[in-house]
Image (tube, rainbow, N blue to C red):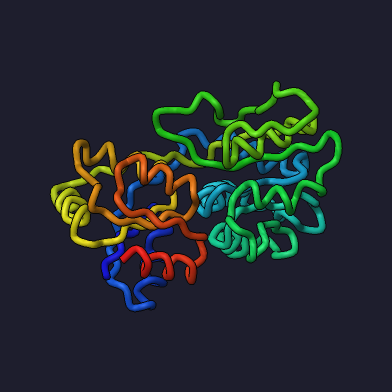
Amino acid sequence: MRVIVTRPRREAQRWSQDLAARGMDVVTLPLIEVAAVTDTEPLQQAWHQLGGWAAVMFVSANAVAAFFAEKPPLDPVLIGSSAIKTRAWVTGPGTRQALLQAGVPAAGIDMPSPEAGQFDSESLWLVVADQLRAGDRVLIVRGDDVEGDSEAPPLGVVGGFGCGAERQTGHGRDWLATQLAARCLQAQFLVAYQRRAPRWGRAEHDLARQAADDGSVWLFSSSQAVANLGLLMPGQSWEQARAVATHPRIGLAARAAGFGRVHDSRPSLPDIVASIELAA
């Protein structure tokens, strides 16, 4: 069977290799392009203030790469080291692996249990909530759309929700920020890289058009990837298309885009392989 891997090119290579090793015909068709930010001063500033945060949450392996690319060359400080007690938070094994490769000790990294129903902010919160104390600050290192995002300036503070009962607004990083604010804690967003729709040529358009109804299985790990596909292929019918989504929210986006068959999966390789086989 053919699998269309839509992750950004960096992550797509790993997933393609892993799925090909399972005997699948894999084609990479990235639906998100990652670019560097033009102003790296906020990243450098964050390194100098590293000890001021109780934790730094990295939303992706790209966030890790962009953050550590600005590490001061003579600065020996690593998150979770004996010198700095800042914890590193991640929602999935890919981001955790990126931190390990960057030199962060495993003992300094928190992520959802391998048995968690999903690798997401909600599952991460169950692991880290009890770490925090009054006055703590959490830095959330993330990407941003090229067009801009009014919710998160390059180094923006999220607050104003008030203290008290937890609010359930938003999801993902935004949901996590509301949980922090509800405890009178401060969440601060740091934009480390830019996300944008890729520029396609005829070959990519032809591949996508063919994969809309030839039995290929689209693998989605981002709602933005689904949205970008709609921008790149306006008017295309996906009624005969098949997809596997690595989170229920992404599955909802794929169904809303018109995909006829969508299977939700945990983002671990065995679960994805099983879901692809079901989708096919």
Instruction: Choose top left, top right, bottom left or bottom right for residue 136.
Output: top right
x, y percent for residue 252: 43, 44
Residue at 37% from the left image edge and 46% from the top image edge: 254
Residue 239, x across and y down, in percent:
24, 48
Between 170 and 94, the one nearer to me in the picture: 170
Q: Position of residue 17 (x, y in %)?
A: 38, 71
Q: Position of residue 229 (x, y in %)?
A: 29, 43
Is 147 left, or right, of 103 in this rendering? left
Q: Residue at x 51, y 24 (%)?
A: 150
Q: Residue at x 79, y 51 (%)?
A: 84
Residue 204 visible in the shown view: yes
- Residue 10 visible to the viewer: no
Q: Quadrant of the N terminus?
A: bottom left
Q: Is residue 82 above or below residue 59?
A: below
Residue at left 44%, top 52%?
221
Q: Is residue 94 above or below residue 75?
A: below
* Left or right position of 117 against 31: right
Residue 37 left/right relative to 86? left
User: Relative to the observer, which residue lies in front, 153 or 24?
Assistant: 24
